[in-house]
Structures are given as C-alpha cells and as structure tokens.
C-alpha cells in the first residue's frame, strides 16, 4: 500500500527560529508523522532572522527562477533547502529579497506589524503550491500551521482545485494564539485574486481582514481544523465550535502527534 503523503506548511520551525509552541510543532510533528510511516514534505518562509550559514541553507536551482505576480509586480521566487539530520528531514524555504530579507519575522523592532504582511502571505502560499507542483508530489493531506499560512486553503480549494496533484488533498488548518493587532491591508481582497477566486469567495475578509476574519477564511476552505494552542482567540474558538466539519481540541505535547496522525487518517476515510 502506498504511504500517506503529508505536506506541512509552517509559519515557524525550530531550530531556524526560536522555540515556541508553533515552532516546536513545525519541527517535531513532521518527524513524528514520518516515524509513523507517512511520507512528508515541509515548507516555511525564509525569514531574515534565519542564519543561512549556520543552518546550511542552499538554493535549489532547479526549483527557483519562477516569477509570481503580486499586485501587478513580478516577484522572483527563490527556493532554498536545509536538512535536520537528526530527524532525516528536509525543510524547503520560500524566499524573495523584497519580502523576506528584513531582520524580523512579522513585526519591526518596535513591534509594529509590517504593512506588506498581506503580500508576503500571498507570496508564501502561492510559492509553496507552485514548488510542490514542480516537485510533482501529490499530498494526501496539506497541514497549514499559523496564520501566515492561512491563504493556502483558499488557493487549494478555489484556484488549484483542478490541478491533478491537489485534486484529492484534504486540508487541515491549525489555529494558534498568534494574533496580529492591526488588520491586514484592505486591498488584500483584490491582491489575492487569481483565476478561480471570486468576490464571493472573499466575502469573509472583504471589509475587514483582521485576525479573526483572516482565520475564518482559512477555516472555511479547510476540511478539518485543529485548536493548536490551549488559549486561542475567543471569537475564533466560538466559531470553530459552531462548525459541523471535523475538528480537534487542543492536545498536550505528549499526545498531539498520535492525535494528529489519527485525525489525518480519519479525514482521508471520509
């Protein structure tokens, strides 16, 4: 029997970024799922905080070189890769000079969120999916972790849904307590559009792309949702609880890998 293939799209992964609940899940979940007999691929943004030399990142020439048009501007897509030897695991990094070479992740040194975080999230989501297409690797499950991955479900369900590689993929979205304070750029609803995405698909973020609405858009387009922090946004928690789609309550560090693996298996049976 063919192995189940799981694509992990993570906002943060340790050791490339400091340890927290999300970055540890980004690191240990793929390894744990691989140890349980599934095949994995893992992606994250190449934030400027990441030390390329120390972590031995190098460009994958055969995957780089494509341009993505965001807000009428051509943006070169650079793909890098590094290995976590102890986990027998590779991590692919989505890079672009304009979006990812500043020395901070999502906020500047004074704690202000970057004005172009909307475009950075668009570039990351599309960059991952275009790279997976180039790899010709068809995931059974696509697991998105953190709000920065939140446009992936929309693109998968509306823009890439006829792509044979993704036609049968189940999308899982993990909600964390990684709230951003200032709503994203209101032009997001126009910038995110590609063929297949209509105004109707974007009504959730049309007037106010704040943290709650942005996450709701991701959840709407997912097949299953996970509460990945033990204290997520109360409005989002209420929204998740009201849904009839498969959901998983917060799991402790000891339990979550087995629980997530079972969650994937159950989704694939549906």
Image (tube, rainbow, N blue to C red):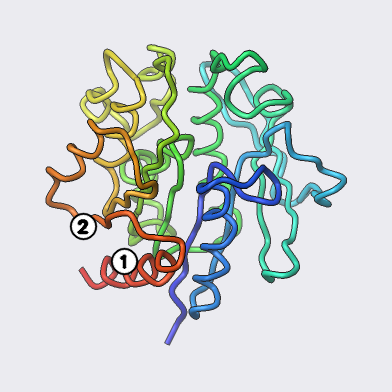
Quadrant including the C terminus: bottom left
Q: Position of residue 116 (x, y in %)?
A: 55, 17
Give the left or right position of residue 115, taking residue 248 as reference: right
- Using a 10 Å C-alpha cutoff, classify the residue at mark 1 as few (fewer than 14 neighbours), some (14 to 19) or many (20 or more): some
Is residue 156 positioned above or below 107 on the image?
below
| Residue occupying image coordinates x 58% and y 68% | 31
Percent x, y of residue 46: 68, 39
Residue 221, quarter of picture: top left
Query: Which of the two discs, 2 and 1, labels the residue nearer the N terminus?
Result: 2
Give the residue displayed 34% in from the left and 67% down from the top. 264
Identify the residue at image location x=72%, y=70%: 86
Q: Residue furthest right?
A: 53
Q: Residue at x 45, y 41 (%)?
A: 146
From the image, which quarter does the N terminus lie in?
bottom left
Q: Which mark is residue 97?
A: none
Q: Nearer the viewer, residue 263 or 136?
A: 263
Label 2: element kind:
loop
Q: Whole-percent x and y of residue 227?
A: 32, 49
- 156 left or right of 43 in image: left
Q: Is residue 146 above or below residue 67?
A: below
Instruction: Check disc 2 and report the residue beneath it.
Output: 246
Q: Which residue is mark 1?
A: 263
């Amino acid at each position: 029997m063919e192995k189940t293939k799981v694509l992990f799209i993570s906002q943060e992964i340790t050791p490339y970024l400091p340890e927290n609940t999300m970055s540890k899940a980004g690191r240990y979940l793929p390894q744990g799922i691989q140890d349980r007999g599934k095949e994995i691929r893992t992606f994250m943004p190449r934030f400027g905080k990441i030390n390329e030399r120390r972590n031995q990142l190098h460009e994958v020439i055969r995957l780089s070189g494509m341009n993505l048009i965001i807000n009428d501007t051509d943006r070169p897509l650079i793909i890098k890769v590094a290995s976590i030897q102890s986990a027998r695991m590779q991590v692919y990094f989505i890079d672009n000079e304009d979006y990812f070479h500043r020395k901070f992740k999502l906020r500047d040194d004074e704690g202000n969120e970057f004005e172009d975080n909307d475009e950075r999230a668009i570039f990351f989501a599309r960059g991952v999916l275009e790279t997976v297409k180039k790899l010709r690797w068809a995931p059974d499950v696509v697991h998105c972790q953190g709000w920065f991955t939140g446009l992936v479900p929309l693109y998968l369900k509306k823009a890439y849904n006829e792509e044979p590689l993704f036609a049968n993929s189940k999308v899982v979205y993990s909600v964390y307590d990684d709230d951003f304070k200032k709503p994203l750029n209101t032009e997001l609803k126009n910038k995110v559009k590609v063929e297949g995405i209509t105004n109707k698909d974007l009504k959730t973020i049309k007037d106010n792309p704040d943290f709650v609405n942005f996450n709701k858009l991701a959840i709407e387009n997912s097949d299953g949702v996970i509460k990945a922090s033990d204290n997520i946004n109360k409005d989002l928690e209420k929204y998740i609880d009201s849904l009839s789609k498969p959901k998983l309550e917060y799991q402790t560090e000891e339990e979550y890998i087995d629980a997530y693996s079972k969650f994937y298996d159950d989704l694939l049976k549906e």
